[in-house]
Structure formats: C-alpha cells, structure tokens
Amino acid sequence: MEGWAGQVSVDHSFAVAWDAGVMLASQRTWWRIAAEIEEQMLRPTIPTKRGNKNGRSAQKPVLKATGPCQIWSWDITDVYSPWRGKAFKVYSIMDIFSRQIVGWRVEDREADHLAVDMFETAIALHGAPRVVHADSGPAMKSNLLRDALTGHGVELSHNRPYVSNDNPFSESGFRTMKYRPGYPRVFMDVETARTYIGDYVPWYNTKHKHSGIALFSPAQVHDGSWKDAWKTRDHALQDYYDKNPGRFRQRPTTPTPAGHVGINLPETKPAKLTA
C-alpha cells in the first residue's frame, strides 16, 4: 500500500487506503503515528510574497465558483537554481473549484507573452473561464495578457496591494508543490525544473488527495467522478462504525467537496432554530 515514505503525505496515504475500502483508523490517528517519523516534519521554508505598503488601495476581490471552469487563479513562483540571484519561474493556472492545474510552464524569466501562450493553450483545452484572478505583478497586469483574455470574454480580477490572502488558491498550490516529500530544493537548469514539474502536475491532478476538497483528487472533482469514489468511502466508514461504535459519539458522515468556493466570500451565519 502506498505510504508517505513514497513522496506522498499522510492525508494522501489515508485517502488511498480509504478509496480501497480499507478503514484502519481515524485520520487523526494516522497523523499521530506519522508524527514519529522525522522526515515528515522537515519542510522547506517558503518565501512569502510582500506587496507594497505604499501602493494605492484597491477594491477587495469577491469571487464565487459553483463548478469547474468558472474561475481560474494564476501566479508565478520561483524555484532555486545553484547560482545566487538566479531562479527559475514556474507559471501555473488553477481552477479554484476543483483545484486542478489547467495550465503551466517553467521558464528562466517572467514575461507576459509567455503567460499569454500558456493561457491560449489552457483555453483551447478547457474553454475560457468567466474570471481569471491573479496578483498585481507586471506580467499579471500587462496589456498584452489583458487583451488576450478579454478577447475570449474573460473578466480580470486582481489582488489588493499588500494583501496576501487575496490569492489563496495559487499560494496553496505552490505550497503543496514545495512541501511535497522528496521535493528537490535546487534545480540545476531550467530543463531539470521542467521535467520535475512535468511529472508533478499529472500526479497532483490525478493522484493527490487534496485536503481542501475532502481528500479527493482535483481531477475527480473537475470531472465529477468523486461521487463514485465517495460511495466506496462511505461504505467503508459505515462498516467501520458498525464494528466500532464505541469510538464515535454518533454515526459519522463521509465528507464531500463543498458546493461552492471563492475568494473573500462573506461568512454565512448558522440559521437560528425557532420553536
């Protein structure tokens, strides 16, 4: 059975077993056991982007997706080279509903025409989304990219200056990549980085058990096949409950992906019960 020693997380290992109809213990118990494995706790330090405190204030982006192919988020992150001051650029487009990576590329520089090429390829494969969200970097706010996307009927949305949580999906996606066990902290050249990301993206989309979508893979949420996998999980969980009722306060329910996701959505207050 696939384990976290094989460059996957504890949540991934737990979900793989669950998908196979095997419920050995609770997710929390898996983590408690895994905490004894030192390698799981050694994670690289990820630099945090800092905006301009003196930048002009901007309107808070508020975005909501109720299904895939509605809102995409994109960003560029650095990966290290052996040379000081030199980094390779990983471009990535993520569907915020399914968390699926729908476009990517690795280059030795940040350029708007490279981003345009990436989006044209992604749109040809998946169709144009309603909105594309990004931070306020030069490539993200370039006229070339704006014209290309609006030509497809896409609305553009951007972070406010110095507000890190306006683009949580792309930030989380890069963090998953860099926190993955076995992630190489240094890439010798841009081709090595491309090869790694080229292997990582299919794994992430089809194999990664994402904690933000009820431990299903992005591809399962993107195409709706998570519903069949959910039936196997629910059967295993209910069977485990029937055999071990004393470990629960009440009959458990099997989690499903949220019906909607978004950026800066207002918090919903629970409804009050009336007599």
Image (cartoon, grey):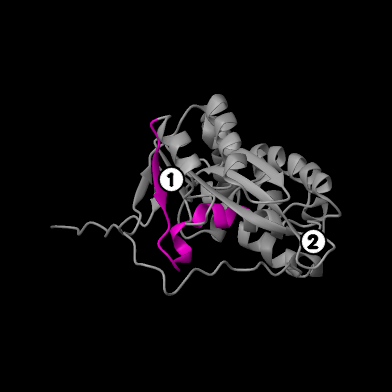
Label of residue 94 in the image: none
Residue at x-position 75% and y-position 66%: 85
Residue at the spot 47% in from the left edge and 34% down from the top edge = 148
Residue most toward the bottom?
A: 53
In magenta stretch: residue 37: no
* x then y, percent, for residue 248: 52, 58
Name the side, left or right, on which 189 lies relative to 226. right
Percent position (x, y) of residue 164? Answer: 48, 65
> In whole angstroms, how far apart are the C-alphas of marks 2 and 1?
33 Å
Identify which residue, 97 or 106, lies in the foreground.
Answer: 106
Question: In the image shown, does 144 or 162 lie closer to the viewer?
Answer: 144
**Image quadrant occupied by the N terminus:** top right
Please report the bounds of the magenta region as a residue range: 153-173
Dot 1 lies on which element?
A: loop
N-terminal-most mark, 2 or 1: 2
Callout 1: 10 Å neighbours few (<14), some, many (20+)? few
Q: Amino acid at mark 1?
A: Ala
**Is-magenta flag for residue 168?**
yes
207 or 19: which is nearer to us?
Answer: 207
In the rendered view of the protein, which quadrant contains the C terminus? bottom left
Mark nearer the viewer, 2 or 1 = 2
The percent position of residue 140, horizontal first and vertical second, equals 50, 50
Label for residue 185? 2
What amino acid type is highlighted by mark number 2?
A: Arg
Q: Quadrant of residue 225?
A: top right
On the question of residue 1 being in view, the answer is no
Q: x, y percentage for residue 217? A: 61, 41
Point 57% across, 32% down: residue:
122
In-image side of 232 versus 81 (left or right): left
Label number found at residue 258: 1
Quarter of the image holding residue 159?
bottom left
Callout 2: helix, strand or loop?
loop
